Image: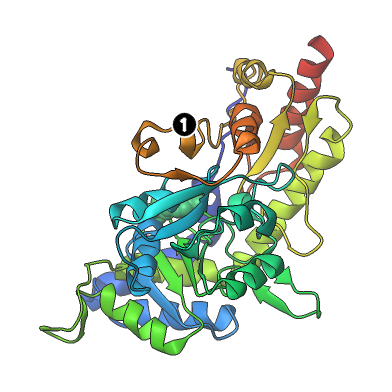
Amino acid sequence: MENSIPMVDLHGQYLRIKPDIDAAMQQVVDSGAFIGGPAVSTFAAHLSDYLGGCPVVTCANGTDALQIALMALGLHPGDEVIVPAFTYVASAEVIALLGLTPVLVDVDPATFNLTAATVAPAISPRTRAIIPVHLFGQCCDMEPLLRLAAEYSLHVIEDNAQAIGAQYTFGDGHTAFSGTMGTIGCTSFFPSKNLGCYGDGGALFAPDAQLAERIRMIANHGQRVKYHHDIIGCNSRLDALQAAILDVKLRHLDEYSEARQRAAHYYTEHLHNIDGLVCPAELSQSTHVYHQYTLRVLDGRRDALKAHLAAHGIPSMVYYPLPLHHQEAFRTISRIGGDLSVATACADSVLSLPMHTELTPAIQDTVIDAVIQFFKQH
Ligand SMILES: *Cc1c(COP(=O)(O)O)cnc(C)c1O
């Protein structure tokens, strides 16, 4: 291979903040407090400040966050939860795990996100909650969705694993961070996420302080007082080393989002004119923090483009190759909430290009040239 371009560059990112990260980790090791302790509470407080004061409960990973959110809402087996058919499996897996029924709905082709229009026809008398997934880093169009949820008294659990730091603007001009608009927001600190640690981690955001307290109990074996278990919970905790790393990286989150946005706009500037290629759309109501830069490749040429890039040493990824209604595990346990043809078409056409905070125009030019060359030849 002439080039070796990574999909993500966690090492390059580390090198730029190495002294701060190393010192933070050493401090945890010296303290001997590896589970809980000041590193975890300090990070949770700083993240809450970042989110404009929304209470934050940390946990072990993003999938746990979603499961704990559903557990906190007191749902019953057979209750229905609406989720997009085009998403990472975790968004829907936890629904089934708790004996609830995932109801799969379609997404908007421009944003890859569910909308009030795709959700409304799927609402039944058993529907209790909606899980909007802010896929690839852009908020779902939340205002119409929140209005619909209020009308039917549905909980809204935002899957914010890919969009931390994105901001949504409501019609009256006020803005809110992704993950703080619904009943509960869930996020993941998996290393490659926009705010990633060096292992597993996750968190829940709950604007309602009482609900936040219930979430805190559930994540800690259902106890408020040690060895006194009031509700059935689970064991899900962020460890102190990860919290210390996240506390350093949180200070850089806005700068990381800007680097991703700059890189995304550079791609779009050079690729938007290509026939048969659709660059990511930006909603006027939401910022886009570009967890992924995801193209749609039309006319069945996605896999050929992917192969062409690979032959030039350029990685690309298909997030996600199968929609949930085509997954064996979901075949019998989910309900189809409407026409899912857009979700199917997205799975067949999406391709994500290298996207991370260390991209330079020089690296991107190599990617862009290879994409342009493909469309000249095909
Ligand atoms: C990463 C991710 C999750 C799960 O997070 P983990 O920390 O890996 O458990 C959930 N939903 C979406 C959309 C994700 O991208």
> Residue 299, how many percent across, how many down?
74, 19
Farthest residue to the front: give it. Answer: 125
Mark 1: amino acid: His
Looking at the image, which residue is at 65% across and 28% down? 349
Quadrant of res 175: bottom right
The image quadrant of residue 75 is bottom left
Q: Is residue 118 left or right of residue 373?
A: left
Q: Is residue 203 visible?
A: yes
Q: Residue furthest right?
A: 273
- Which residue sits at x=14%, y=85%? 226
User: In the figure, is residue 234 to the left or right of 286?
Assistant: left
Q: Secondary structure at mark 1?
A: helix
Front residue of this view, candidates 126 and 222: 126
Q: Residue at x 58, y 43 (%)?
A: 338
Q: Quadrant of residue 269?
A: top right
Q: How is the image coloured?
A: rainbow
Q: Residue furthest top?
A: 377
The residue drawn where x is 61% and y is 19% is: 303
Question: What residue is shown with label 1?
Answer: 326
Counting labels gives: 1
Q: Is residue 198 visible?
A: no
Q: Is residue 47 above or below residue 59?
A: below
Image coordinates of residue 167 in percent, x first then y, are 69, 69
Instruction: Judge left or right: residue 237 versus residue 341.
Output: left
Q: Residue 348's spot in the image, x, y percent?
A: 61, 27
The answer to whether residue 196 is above or below residue 220 is above
Mark 1 crowd level (few <14, some 14–19, many ≥20, 10 Å Cα): few
Which quarter of the rendered picture does the N terminus lie within?
Answer: top right
